[in-house]
Image: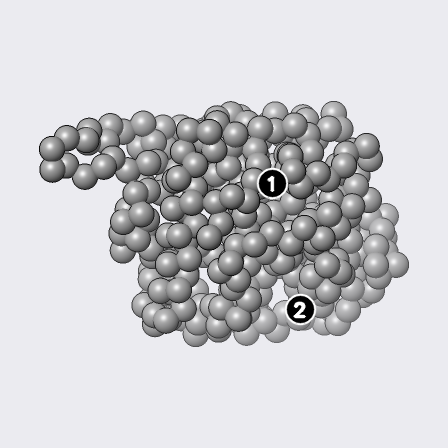
């Protein structure tokens, strides 16, 4: 891995440790031991996630006991600074599984002891470029400021790809690394002219401030799988059945959410400061994209590795080998 990226991940590891220390006592809590008539102990899975609003079906399922019924104590660890921070959490030993984007591929390519075990319900690139009122196209961003999110993360990579395919470079546009900064607040402040976001935030900005969606990353990447589910080698060895149960519980969670949209919207509205109509509209968009087979697109993954090489996020001598990168025996 490039030295600068190692430095970023090392810094992120410090951040990860401070974020995750609060979870240590919960993760290590004693489960009731098996005995006559007592239920089997739950297997704790600490799963890394990069957002809160997007995990509504999963969080609702945790509260409804879905994961517990499948023998899992699921503890979601959110990393607001992005995939580099989350991957540092994995390297630090604080995370067992995770669901996010290209930093997973970068981690595997750099020798991190993880395997891709499946896909989340939405696996395509979710990033979108939303501009303030008055900007109508990507070309209009020349000489302007674009907030790209975490350096080395999927959002930053998407900005570079979209700019490149529209004949622009980082020399033509000021790209601001905005790790951990609220994209909506940034655009409303006037400090930037466009932000990378998506889903609920995109819908809110368009509805309330006249912002415009000027590019979707998925339209630029071709056949490309962005998001994956991984597990660490140690967790795969120790708890293979728990990984299988994780996918069973996740499928049940999303099937329930799809048929109980009102409950899902109300639950999400209690956790995020967004109007219910925007939450509902966003879930309706997402539900149409849900793939509950959790299958990995091998061609799309190979193309993702190729693009990450082009962006110099993965070394040129790395070869995508499904037999060593993936372990898909847990999918049913």
Residue 38 coordinates in the image, percent (x, y): 14, 36
Residue 168 point in image, percent of width and height: 86, 56
Tell me: residue 194, above or below residue 95: below
Q: Residue at x 73, y 59 (%)?
A: 223
Which residue is situated farthest in the left direction here?
A: 36
Residue 323 vertical position relative to residue 28 in the rendered view, above or below: below
Residue 137 is left or right of residue 117, and the answer is right
Find residue 137 and report its horizontal and vertical position in percent. 77, 69
Binning the other alpha carbons within 10 Å of mark 2 as few (below 14), some (14 to 19) or many (20 upward) gives: many
Residue 13 appears anywhere in the view: no
Q: Which residue is mark 1?
A: 326
- Quarter of image, res 3: top right
Q: First in sequence: mark 1 or mark 2?
A: 2
Task: Report the side of 254 relative to 158 (left or right).
Answer: left
Q: Secondary structure at mark 1?
A: loop
Q: Residue at x 55, y 51 (%)?
A: 119
* Whole-percent x, y for residue 184 in the image: 56, 58
**Numbered label attached to residue 213:** 2
Q: Nearer the viewer, residue 326 or 136?
A: 326
SS at circle 2: strand
Q: Residues within 10 Å of mark 1 (few under 14, many from 20)?
A: some
**Would you place residue 297 above or below residue 179 in this image?**
below
Residue 273 is labelled as none
**Is residue 194 found left or right of 32 in the rendered image?**
right
Write the residue at 34% across / 31% down.
27
Quarter of the rendering containing residue 123: bottom right
From the viewer's perspective, is the residue at label 1 or at label 2 nearer?
1
Rounded to the nearest angstrom, the CA distance separating label 1 from label 2 is 35 Å
Residue sitting nearer the eye, 270 or 89 = 89
């Amino acid at each position: 891995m490039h030295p600068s990226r190692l430095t970023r991940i090392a810094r992120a590891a410090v951040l990860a440790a401070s974020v995750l220390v609060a979870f240590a006592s919960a993760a290590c809590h004693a489960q009731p031991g098996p005995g006559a008539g007592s239920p089997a102990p739950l297997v704790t899975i600490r799963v890394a996630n990069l957002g809160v609003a997007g995990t509504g079906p999963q969080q609702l399922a945790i509260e409804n006991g879905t994961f517990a019924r499948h023998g899992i104590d699921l503890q979601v660890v959110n990393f607001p600074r992005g995939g580099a921070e989350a991957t540092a959490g994995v390297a630090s030993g604080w995370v067992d599984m995770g669901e996010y984007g290209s930093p997973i591929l970068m981690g595997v390519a750099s020798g991190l002891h993880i395997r891709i075990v499946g896909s989340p319900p939405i696996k395509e690139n979710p990033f979108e470029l939303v501009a303030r009122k008055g900007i109508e196209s990507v070309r209009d961003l020349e000489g302007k400021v674009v907030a790209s999110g975490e350096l080395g993360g999927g959002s930053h990579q998407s900005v570079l790809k979209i700019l490149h395919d529209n004949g622009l470079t980082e020399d033509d546009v000021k790209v601001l690394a905005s790790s951990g900064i609220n994209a909506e607040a940034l655009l409303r402040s006037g400090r930037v002219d466009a932000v990378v976001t998506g889903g609920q935030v995109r819908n809110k900005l368009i509805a309330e401030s006249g912002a415009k969606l000027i590019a979707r990353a998925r339209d630029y990447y071709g056949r490309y799988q962005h998001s994956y589910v991984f597990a660490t080698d140690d967790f795969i060895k120790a708890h293979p059945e728990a990984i299988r149960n994780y996918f069973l519980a996740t499928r049940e969670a999303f099937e329930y959410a799809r048929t109980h949209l009102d409950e899902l919207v109300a639950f999400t509205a209690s956790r995020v400061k967004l109007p219910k109509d925007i939450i509902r509209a966003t879930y309706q968009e997402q539900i149409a994209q849900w793939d509950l087979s959790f299958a990995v697109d091998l061609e799309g993954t190979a193309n993702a590795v190729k693009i990450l090489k082009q962006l110099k996020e993965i070394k040129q001598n790395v070869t995508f080998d499904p037999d060593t990168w993936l372990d898909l025996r847990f999918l049913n």
